[in-house]
Every structure is written in C-alpha cells, then in structure tokens.
Image (tube, coloured by chain):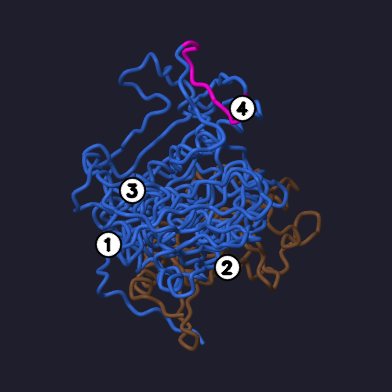
Chain colours: A blue, B brown
Amino acid sequence: MTTNPVQSQMIKEAMQAIAERKPGRSKLVYDKTKRTIVAVAEGSNAPQALNITADDADMFSVVTLSAEWLRDRWPELKKAGLLPVTFSSWDGGDALTHSELCVHPSPTIVEGSILLGQQPADKRSDFAILLKPIDGHAFKPDVFASPDGGTYRAQVLLPAGQSTSPPEVEFVDVEPQLALRRAGILETTILKDKTVVCIGLGTGGAFIAVELAKCGIGNFVLVDRDRLSVGNVVRHPGGISQVGRSKVNVLRDLILDKNPKASIEIHAIEVGFDKRDVIAGLVQRADIVICGTDNRQSKLLINELCVEANVTAIYGGAFRRAYGGQVLRVRPKHSPCQQCFVSAMPEEAADVEVSSAFDAGEIAYSDRPVAVEPGLSLDVLPISNLQAKLALLELLADKSSTLNALRRDFDAPWYLWLNRPEPGTQYATLPPLSESSDEMTINRWYGIYFDRDEACPVCGDFIAGLAASYGFDPALLPALPDKE
Amino acid sequence: MMWTYAQRQRLALEHQILLNEGFSQFIVYHQAAYDSYYASGLATSNSGREYSLWIPIPSGFPTERPPLYILNPHPLLMADGRTISSLGVSHSMHTLEPHASGYVQICHWRSARWHAGIVLQKVFLKAHIWIEAYEQHLATGRDLADFVRTMAEVV
C-alpha cells in the first residue's frame, strides 16, 4: 500500500469515482508503455505511475450498520424521514461501528442520522447516511433491502467542511452471517435452544463458555463468585480493562460479543453446600453442565446434583503447574461419576492445579502456606477444547451432525492429556513425540476406560453394598437413638 | 434443612458399622427437636486418658466433609502450655479451624481429599491415631505431625 499521501489521495478519488460510476478528478488507467496502472489527475501534466496493491482497496474507512436494527426501525424512518444513530469510533475514525452491535463501546461515540430519500439541499452539520432508492436487487454490502420490498443504496454524507473521502457503508445481518460459518458442521438450530450451565469461570471454564457461544449455544447459566484479578489476565479471556469485574459479568459480555442473541443468566455465588438448593435448581434446567471448578468438594457437590437430576456433566482440570490435565464425562448411571473416579483413582483425582488464592488457602496451613502455581494458558486450553467438543457431542447426540463422526473416537469416560514430561511425575521419562508410535507421549489425547462403581455412594447403591459387606439388611436398620 | 431418605439411611448404617466394628463407644444420634444429627463418644488413649469426640453431621453429608472436634479436655494444651486452638489451621499439630467455642478440630481428611466413600468409623479411627500422636507430643515436645506421618498408610 502506498505511503505517499498525494498518491493515496489520487487512488482514493479514482476508486471512489469508479465505485460511484461517475467522473472524478482522478482516474485510473492502464499505461501500456509503462505496463502499469497510472492515476491521471485533473490539472496534472503527466500521468503518475502508482504502485497499487490489494491493500489499497482497504484504504477507505468503513461504517458498519445493523440491518436487523434498521428493519425493526423502518416504519419509524419512513414516517419521520430521519433516524438518530450512534456509532463507536475506532482507530481515529477508520471504523465506525453501529452502537447496536457493540457490547464494549468505544470511548469515542459519533452521533449521526439516517436519512431516507433525497439528499437535503442544505449542508448538514452532522454525520449522516443517506438511503437512496435503487432499482432491482443488488446483493452488495452497501445495499439495504427494506421490509416493504424496497432496495436502497447507502451513501455517507460528511459534515460540511470535511473534505476527506466518505467512508463505505456496510450493512450486516449478524445472526445469518454467524450461522453461515457453522452451517453444515453444527446443527445451530438445535444448539440455540440448548442450555449450558457453566460452573466455575476460570481460564478453562471461561474458554469453554466462549467457544460454546461461538458454536451457537443459545442459553447460558454462568456461576462463579470470583472477580477478575490482574493475575488472571495472563490466562483468562478477560483482559486488563475488566480487572475487578465479577467473572460472570465479564463472561456475559464476552459471550454476547460472539453470540448477541444468547440468553445469559448470571449467579455470582460460591459453589458450596450452603448453596446446594440454588445450584440444584440451576442444574435441573441444564442440558449439560460444564464444571470448571478445581476443588474436590465443589466437583463432588456438582456431581451429586447432576447425578440426581440425570444431567450429563463434563469435568476438566489441569494437573499441577498445568503439565497436563484430564477430562471426565459423566453420563449419570451410564458411565463412572466423579465419585467413582475419586474412589478408583485417588491420586489422579487429587492432582489438581492450585490456580487461585482461594484454592491455595483451602489446602494451606497457617504454618505451611501454599502458593498459587504458575501455569500457561497454552497448557490449559487443550483441556478446555476437548471439554467444549465433548459438550457439543452430547448436545447433538441424537441429531444429524458432521461432529457425530467423532462419537467413535470419544467414547471413553476419562481423557488424559500431557503438555510436557514433568520432572517428578510418572510421565517424566516419556519418549519424544517423534520417536513414539504407540507409547504414551505429550500432546495426544488418551481415552481411558474404567468401570462404574456399582456400590458408588452417589451413582450406585452404596448402602446396599456396604450393608451386605457387614451382613446387615438395610431395610431392617434400627432407628437412631434420639437426643434432646 | 431437610435430610434426604438416602442421608438418613446412610447415617443409620454408619451407626451400625460403629457398633459392629468395635467402635461401640461412638454413637450416631438424632436430635429430633432440630432434626439434626451428630456422632459422639469417648475415646480412651493407651495411657487411659479420655477424650470426648463430637462430629456434627453437616447438611451435605456424606459428600460434605464432617468436622471432628475434641470437646474435652478443653482447652486442649500443647507441650509448651499454649492452647492448640490458638494455632488455627496447623500442619505441625494436624488441626483445622477450631470451633467457635474454641474446641480443637482435628484434621482427619482435608476437604481436598474427602469423598462420600469414607465412613465415620474411619474418621474416629483417625481421631484415635491423632490422640496417640498428641500424647507423644506432650511427652516429647516434638510436633504431632512427626507421629502421624504414616497415618494414611495406617488407615
């Protein structure tokens, strides 16, 4: 792209003239002798050779306007001939984005109006977009099809005295344009009616929620008591500008930025036994629960509630210092639950990352403090990615979907992932990735099968199992002694 | 709170296990007036000293970890004469947050290790081990933790 301001202005003017199909002060022509495109400017003695690249096509600023909003307001515009409109101005005015589209508005707001019909005779003092009727249907970004069957081309009218080239207008239909990129792989019409309850919105939980929003999940219930801290930002999708906000609010905005039609319910509460009834109520409404908490008690509580409500849950977590991680998918009564997992594999279940001051406090002693561990976002995201994918598979379980081909690949209840051969672990001596074909290595998912515990205290019949081992009949247990 | 049928049945079973496994000095009680449960009893150390143990059953039991407090002797002192409860959550003495009334809460399982498959009989068994270690602490002045390091293997 040319950096010469004179050339840049000539190219702009020539392109504008071509776009508007009317003669301008400059025009672009092909010079056979110089074998290049040259700009011929009015009043110039000689044509000027220009090095035009594809980037030059992007030199116009852009105004983006919600077509859906305009359709909704069309009767009002037709009646009044004018609609007030505001834009977030980005990059010194290079992009003006309709405020209706902005979850996070720019600090600079530009006010303007949309005019219908003919250009006003007098010069306006504010920024305006004129909609001029055209014949037929033109599927171009600057053409708007009104609800009453009309077709209009948008043209920006700059305020009086402003001599720069007017920006291009682009109408966007958010929902269809988003759906277009997912159609054929995901059944978005099904997903938009599904409800995902995300409990724990740390790095992993937040990533999953945003990914599911991108996939078109329509309803989210977000649960987390924490606020975003500076230390979180190095891994969390939330940024420095959101430090101090509740994570549920940060995630609500991130989700809406990806899926504006999503319905989002937030609960800034701690996942503890004193909130059991509240969380039970949320779980009962879920099509699936994503557990992003990393302490055992909260996982076991969620497990108990999900088994009770017969709702599938996906648990994930990083090992210490995020050297690897694991994912457990629990289909109540059909696969091992979280309680079966901790009973069968206590060491694996206990290997968790200490990723927050709260979690460190939970396992620290006053005379033996525990520090928050370092861990890379890069190492957490593979785990979250699989959780999100398993969640989609569950939600599309009995529907036709390209993703269903993965069901034969992801049929294990438990998955293990290793980011590195961490010293001091059983994985310290893994062979290099390049030298192994069937041995365990880093950067591969391992699906691991283990059986449900028929005598599990949560998903099995623990009491019958235990009573039998002690020779009791559980139906004949005497009443407990009463105490005043 | 409302106890579920499964919770009530589990507590009845816990009571029977205590009776059948030689822990009959510990009983699971129902307080009808409050519809609450607790387990309690006297533990006697090898030296013959008695300790009154109390486990108030939390509403989330058995998924929620039950605390175990020593009601008597109270206050429970260290070898240097300080109260154990003044240490709070202590690794050297294997204690967790003391009760509001100052009773020592021993660390049988931390929340990060507790799960619903653990029965109260094992909790009382760990309390016995803690008590023996405590008396060794009184005799030697060394940390109680020095004597319970192998507790996990014992239980």
Element under label 1? loop
Is circle 2 on the same chain as circle 4? Answer: no
Residue under label 2, please give it: B53
**Disc 3 designates what residue?**
A139
Q: Nearer the viewer, mark 2 or mark 4?
A: 4
- The amino acid sitting under disc 1 is Asp
What is the C-alpha distance between the residues marked 3 and 2? 80 Å
Q: Are marks 3 and 1 on the same chain?
A: yes
Label 1, label 4: how far apart the Cα atoms are: 80 Å
Q: Which residue is mark 4?
A: A7
Estimate the x, y position of residue A425 in percent, counting from the top left: 50, 29
| The N terminus of chain A, quarter of image | top right
Give the letter of the chain under mark 3.
A
Q: Is residue A475 left or right of residue A440?
A: left
Q: Where are the magenta residues, as a range?
A: A33-44
Looking at the image, can residue B124 be seen? no
Residue in view at x 23 percent, y 52 percent: A397
Mark 1 or mark 4, which has the lower sequence index? 4
Residue shown at 48% from the left, 63% from the top: B64
Where B27 falls versus A253 (above or below)? Answer: below
Disc 4 marks a residue whose amino acid type is: Gln
Does the CB distance between marks 1 and 2 fall below 8 Å?
Answer: no
Q: Chain of mark 1?
A: A
Do discs 3 and 4 belong to a common subunit?
yes
Three-letter amino acid code at disc 2? Answer: Leu
Point 61% across, 59% down: residue: B106
* SS assignment at label 4: helix
* Picture quadrant where residue A125 is located: bottom right
Q: Nearer the viewer, mark 3 or mark 4?
A: 4
Disc 2 crowd, CA 10 A, few/some/many (<14, 14-19, 20+): many
